[in-house]
Amino acid sequence: EGGILLKQQPQSFIGEKKLEELTVEIYKGKEGHYLHYEDDGKSFDYTKGVYNLFDISFCYKEGRMDIKFDKIHFGYDKGVKKYKFIFKNFDDIKEIKINGEKVEKESCEIEL
């Protein structure tokens, strides 16, 4: 089984920098899954539905990478807008699709 890890630019404290982009690293395997939660990190507004929850998964077979990026809940409009995908230890990716749309390996990203 593969893995998914999200990375961001380092910060000294929450809110020091506005997060514009997250990097989604996908590690070699047949499939992987990651549940990503996002809110302001400061308030209790998440109790009022002000948060985002995304289900990120991939399936890799015979050179084809299928990524699904599903919005389970989208209530925090100040969240990250761009997710860039990087593939670790895959030598033979021939085709990549995100939510069914073909993308190039060099520009493999999704914008919300």
Image (spheres, rainbow, N blue to C red):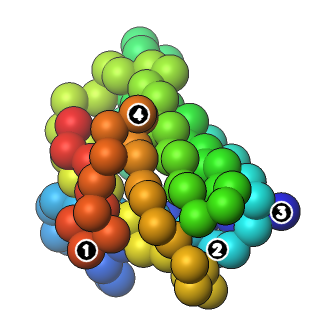
User: Is tag 2's residue or tag 1's residue first in the polypeptide sequence?
Assistant: 2
SS class, disc 3: loop
Q: Is residue 81 above or below residue 61?
A: above
Q: Element at badge 1?
A: helix
> Which residue appears farthest toward the right when viewing the image?
1
Contact (CB < 8 A) between labels 2 and 3? no
Instruction: Please report whichever mark, 3 or 4, sits nearer to the chain's N-terminal start.
Output: 3
Q: Residue 46: x, y in percent?
A: 44, 26
Of label 2 and label 3, which has the lower sequence position? Answer: 3
**Dot 2: element:** strand
Identified by mark 1, the residue type is Glu
Measured in 3D between alpha carbons, the distance from the residue under mark 3 to the one under mark 4, in whole angstroms, is 22 Å
Camera-side residue: 30 or 71? 30
Picture layout, residue 30 above or below residue 57: below
Which residue was labeled with disc 3?
1
Percent position of residue 21, x then y: 24, 62
Q: Residue at x 51, y 71 (%)?
A: 93
Q: CA distance from mark 3 to mark 1?
A: 24 Å
Question: Sequence order check: which comes first, mark 3 or mark 1?
Answer: 3
Looking at the image, the residue that sits furthest to the top is 48
The residue where tag 4 is placed is 100
Residue at coordinates 41% horizontally, 47% vertically from top-left?
97
**Depth-wise, is mark 3 or mark 1 nearer the camera?**
1
| Residue highlighted by disc 1 | 106
Q: Which residue is mark 2?
A: 27
Q: Callout 4: helix, strand or loop?
A: loop
Q: In the rendered structure, which amino acid carries the disc numbered 4?
A: Gly
Q: Quadrant of residue 92?
A: bottom right
Q: CA distance from mark 4 to mark 2?
A: 20 Å
